[in-house]
Image: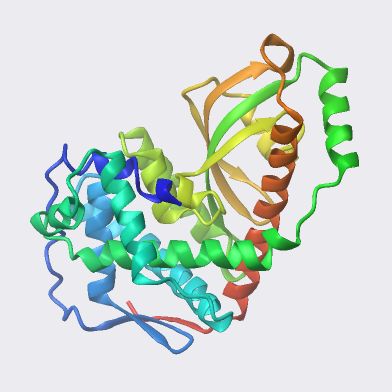
Amino acid sequence: MVRVFAAVFLLVTLNTVTAAPAATQSAAKIAAVVNDRAITVHDVQSRMALIFMTARIPNTAATRKKLLSQVLNQLVVESIQSQEAKRLRISVNDREVAETLAQIEKQNRMPSGRLLKILKARKVNPSTLVDQVKASLAWSKVIRRSIASNIRVSGDEVDDSIARLNANKNRQIYRILEIYIPAARNDAGAGALRTTRRLIAQIRRGASFGGLARQFSQASTASKGGDMGFVFEGQLPPELEDAIKRVKPGQIIGPVRTSTGYYILALTSKRTYGSGKPPTRKQVENSIFRRKVSVRARQYLRDLRRAAFVDIRI
């Protein structure tokens, strides 16, 4: 979980980005209600300012307008996730948050306590980052308790996967980053498609893929900047498998439509199975495990979203 924001904050010291201009409406105005919790306009403005800092997105009026619905949607999702953590009596204490922030500082060679001071200097309320860290830590605990703890990978599954790899030494091993935007039932995925296209446009203009994944992706890999780790050919859903075969390392592809939403994929590296050291049995097992957790986590969040009362007011 240290990697949640580790690489992103290196950008903060290199870029001077100020918070978005205050909206004419009161910052205390309610932007959305999620079950019994309110999200204010101030919450949206603060998160948007954090995104400009961490994802290398230009802070313009046009960009703010395009990002509004995406930022608000992500805050809605985090509220749903936090409420589920509370229902399960899962909490995140101040020590865990402080340890995460301290490790981010250490990895970026920052003096202790420097991180929150940087936020203040850029006119971003430090609680914006703290709240996001808490939500991320809490949801990770929910996934571990409710999903990961119940998933098993049998020896036969590992044997079968290794046998398939050995049967075809020309199969590829990919290193992939992902951003996943689920499609809402009430708009036939139109909103998700617009969001995905906007994110692709930002990436092509130089925005950080990992930064956008942390802020907007609803895959279980979001806290790691969308990093799926090593994926073996044949393990991805057919739509994603077909898409990733069409790109070279360093390229992105999307929107990729699936039955549940849209993906943006970035291929960071690939090699044939027989061209290097073969994966260990443990690596194959971990790959199968991550795929199972990812599928179950998406379904879990989708069910929570459908059951929640969400009232968007801006």
Query: Quadrant of the image for the C terminus?
Result: bottom left
Please tell me whether residue 245 is drawn above or below residue 302 in the rendered image: above
How many numbered discs, if any?
Answer: 0
The answer to whether residue 181 is left or right of residue 121 is: right
The answer to whether residue 205 is left or right of residue 253 is: left
- Percent coordinates x, y for residue 239 in the rendering: 70, 39
- Percent coordinates x, y for residue 189 in the rendering: 58, 59
- Percent coordinates x, y for residue 147 in the rendering: 69, 63
What colouring style does the render use?
Answer: rainbow
Res 172 → quadrant: top right
Q: Nearer the viewer, residue 144 or 127?
A: 144
**Residue depicted at x 50% and y 75%:** 80
**Residue depicted at x 45% and y 46%:** 197
The answer to whether residue 192 is left or right of residue 242 is: left
**Residue depicted at x 56% and y 83%:** 87
- Percent coordinates x, y for residue 264 in the rendering: 52, 41
Q: Nearer the viewer, residue 226 or 23?
A: 226
The answer to whether residue 212 shows anywhere in this view is yes
Please tell me whether residue 27 is drawn above or below residue 208 in the rendered image: below
Res 20 → quadrant: bottom left
Instruction: In the displayed orientation, state which residue is furthest to the top.
Output: 275
